Every structure is written in structure tokens, then in C-alpha cells.
Image (cartoon, rainbow, N blue to C red):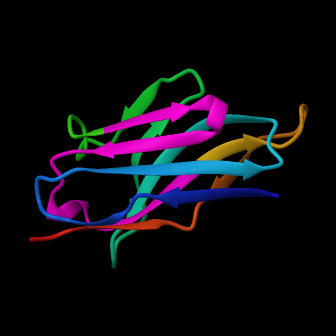
């Protein structure tokens, strides 16, 4: 059993910052890529940022220069530092991780329940 638990969402004003955290727990042998996705009401889920186990990152064009993804492999945790937040960043943010539960098992894709970020004046 694997769980991803997000935290750090909330209500902020435009221009402010938030940091999201997501920790994976349970039966985990290794974690490959981790990432953040978001879904606004009426929209499809979209990629925000991803990070590999070696630290290579990828960002959506809409957040480049404002968001920073990082991870702590010892804690199985991924972070998303969000600066200069805009109303269009309002969404439910979900953590994603590719996890191998045993040494020679395949990687499976896991999702957290989501944390709400609302940017409004």
C-alpha cells in the first residue's frame, strides 16, 4: 500500500507565495519521477512541474520563472514553491509519483488526493 499526502494549500492574494509538500509513505522500494499537476473547475488536469530522482526538472510554460519544484529523496517528499501567484493559478493541486514497491517490480503511478490553492483578492 502506497499513499501520497499533500499539504500547504490555501487562500492567498495575487502576488503572494505558497509552498506545497507531498510525502509518499507505505511499501516503497524506490521512487522515480515525482511531480505536481493541477485541475481547475471545468478544465482538464494539466502538468505543472516534474522532477526526476536525479533532480532534472520540467515546468509548464505558464509557471516557468515563478514556481520551483524540489525533492528530498531521504524523506520521499516533493515540494512546489509557488511565487508571484496569479488568479489563474487557482486549482486543485495533485501530487504524482512513479513508485516501485519491490526491487524487481515495475514502477506504478500514484496520485495524492489534492490540495486546493485559491488566489484571489
Q: Which residues are magenta?
A: 68-96
Is 73 a magenta residue?
A: yes
The vertical placement of 56 against 37, above or below, is: above
**69 left or right of 86?**
right
In the orientation shown, which residue stands out farthest toward the bottom? 42
Please state the horizontal and vertical placement of residue 74, each as a whole percent of the image.
65, 30
Q: Is residue 60 above or below residue 110?
A: above
Where, quadrant-wise, is the C terminus in this rendering?
Answer: bottom left
Q: Between residue 55 and residue 104, name the one nearer to us.
A: 55
| Frontmost residue, 40 versus 67 | 67
**Is residue 72 in the magenta section?**
yes
Q: Residue at x 24, y 37 (%)?
A: 64
Name the one closer to the observer, 31 or 9: 9
- Relative vertical location of residue 112 with respect to residue 97 in this rendering, above or below: below
Which residue extends farthest top?
Answer: 54
For the point 50% across and 23% down, the residue is 55
Image label count: 0
Image quarter in which the N terminus is found: bottom right
Image-quadrant location for residue 31: top right
- Residue in the picture at 66% in, 49% down: 24
Q: In x, y percent, where is residue 43?
A: 34, 71
Q: Can you give x and y, in whole percent of width and height, for residue 12 in the image?
A: 20, 64
In the displayed structure image, the side of residue 107 where residue 41 appears, left or right: left
In the rendered view, would you say 65 is above or below 112? above
Q: Position of residue 76 (x, y in %)?
A: 64, 39
Amino acid at each position: 500500500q502506497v499513499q501520497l499526502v499533500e499539504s500547504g494549500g490555501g487562500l492567498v492574494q495575487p502576488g503572494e507565495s505558497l509552498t506545497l509538500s507531498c510525502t509518499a509513505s507505505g511499501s516503497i522500494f524506490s521512487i522515480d519521477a515525482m511531480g505536481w499537476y493541477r485541475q481547475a473547475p471545468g478544465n482538464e488536469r494539466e502538468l505543472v512541474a516534474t522532477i526526476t530522482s536525479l533532480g532534472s526538472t520540467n515546468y509548464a510554460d505558464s509557471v516557468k520563472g515563478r514556481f520551483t519544484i524540489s525533492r528530498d529523496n531521504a524523506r520521499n517528499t516533493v515540494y512546489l514553491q509557488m511565487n508571484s501567484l496569479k488568479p489563474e493559478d487557482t486549482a486543485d493541486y495533485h501530487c504524482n509519483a512513479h513508485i516501485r514497491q519491490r526491487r524487481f517490480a515495475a514502477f506504478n503511478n500514484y496520485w495524492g488526493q489534492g490540495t486546493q490553492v485559491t488566489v484571489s483578492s
